[in-house]
Amino acid sequence: MRFYLKLLVLIAIFVAAARHSLWRTLGDLAYDLRVAHVSAFGSSEDVARLIDDTQYMQVRDGTGLDLYLKGKRYRQLVAQRLADAAARGQQLGDAELATIRYECQWEAYGSQTDLSTEPIEPAVTWP
């Protein structure tokens, strides 16, 4: 009887210790299946959502949630302003794109940043 009691206690300890890694492994497997499904059957919206969820998961495991949310807000502002310019049929030069980027940085991050002259990357496209 004592042997079975010790065995049950050891099994409980093993299950408690392995439970965390088991859930992590199952989560990684589910993520891999989602990536495979999106790459095979997904639309550009699915890819954008997958990228956003992946960035969020990486940040959630770390400590940069505030920076992630500000970056997400910045990308939304840039996309909105570029869409507004496209709806008006306005062609934007490098100076206007830099101004848009600067204004969006100011609004999203709330502090003065250097005027960025890097090109604005297009939205995620899917072939």
Image: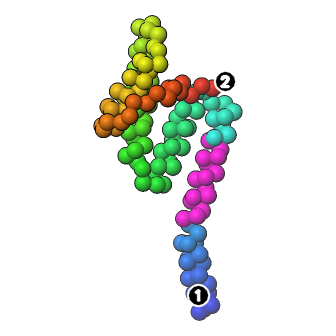
Q: Which residues are magenta?
A: 20-34
User: CA separation, marks 2 and 1?
Assistant: 59 Å
As drawn, 32 above or below 50: below
Q: Nearer the viewer, residue 22 or 65?
A: 65
The colour style of the image is rainbow
Total numbered labels placed on residues in the image: 2
Q: For residue 25: magenta?
A: yes
Give, as a three-letter code, the residue at label 2: Pro
Query: In this rendering, would 42 be left or right of 115?
Result: right
List the single residue furthest toward the bottom.
Answer: 2
Residue 100: percent from left, percent from top: 39, 23
Q: For residue 120: magenta?
A: no
Q: Which one is in front in this view, the residue at disc 2 or the one at disc 1? A: 2
Look at mark 1 in the image and give the residue it sits on: 6
As drawn, 82 above or below 33: above
Residue 67 visible somewhere in the drawing: yes
List the single residue furthest toward the top.
Answer: 89
Label 2 with label 1: CB-CB less than 8 Å? no
Residue 103: percent from left, percent from top: 35, 27
Residue 62: percent from left, percent from top: 46, 55
